[in-house]
Image (tube, rainbow, N blue to C red):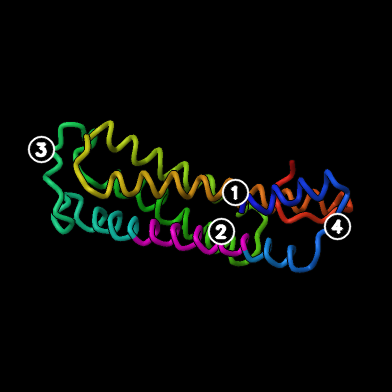
Amino acid sequence: LAGLDIGWRIRKATGKLPLGEAERAAAERATKVILGVLVALELFVAFGALYGGGGMLMDPAGRPLGLPPPGEMAGLRFGSYLVPGVILLLANGLLPFAVVLGALTGQRWAIRAHMVVGMVLTVWTAVEVLMLGWISVLQPVMLVVGIAIFALGMLFHARKEGARHLAMAGEEHPSPAT
């Protein structure tokens, strides 16, 4: 992906613009791959949150999920898993689903919303670790997934918005603006 940007800079410096069809097509494919990875990661997060949050709502004591009783969780600020379940369901379940739906239907707001999903997941995981400690193997996994979604969201945003701004200026370019 970085090679496309470097190639464009070289062509710009040497005056060999505009880009050819093959380069444009390759850049579009790369952007679609980034979107595909984002959608897959966001669906992974959403389904996991629907399972976890739904389980907490069905039994706020956490028994079906194998969670320790809320009274035994020193850092848990709630008397049950009901409030964390609702927050989990909304923040990491419904939000990613909405962003995926927006992205797949071409909504412009979804371009930036991928970054929000990554930030929300990263903050959720960090707060969970600060409150409860490292209690599950899923915590580091979800932390990495959150950071990856945020980073890919930034890359996707740069590619989409950079190409849009350059097109508005009368110049086509598959990479982020320089």
For marks 2 and 3, the one nearer the N-term is: 2
Q: Is 68 situated left or right of 136 in this image?
A: left
Residue at 40 percent of width and 51 percent of height: 92
- Disc 1 from disc 4: Cα separation: 22 Å
Q: Is residue 68 magenta?
A: no
Question: Relative to the observer, which residue lies in front, 47 or 11?
Answer: 11
Q: Nearer the viewer, mark 1 or mark 3?
A: 1
Of labels 1 and 2, earlier in sequence is: 2
Identify which amino acid the numbered label 3 is placed on. Glu
Of the numbered discs 1 and 4, the one sitting upstream in the chain is 4
The residue labelled by disc 4 is: 18
Q: Label for residue 34? A: 2
Q: What residue appears at the point 47 percent right and 53 percent down from the top-left corner?
A: 95
Query: Residue drawn at (41%, 45%), measured in percent from left and top?
Result: 121
Mark 2 vs mark 3, foreground winner is: 2
Q: Is residue 42 magenta?
A: yes
Q: Which residue is mark 1?
A: 155
Q: Nearer the viewer, mark 1 or mark 4?
A: 4
- Checking the image for residue 72, the label placed there is 3
- Badge 4, how many Cα within 10 Å: few under 14, some, many 20+? few
Image: magenta residue range: 30-47
Residue 175 % position (x, y): 70, 51
Cβ–Cβ below 8 Å for labels 4 and 2?
A: no
**Which element type, helix, strand or loop, lies under badge 4?**
loop
Question: Contact (CB < 8 A) between labels 1 and 2?
Answer: yes
10 over 47 or under it: above or below: above
Three-letter amino acid code at disc 1? Leu
Whole-angstrom CA distance, mark 3 to mark 4, is 64 Å
Please, what is the three-letter code of the amino acid marked with disc 4?
Pro
Magenta span dominant secondary structure = helix
In the rendered image, which quarter contains the N terminus?
bottom right
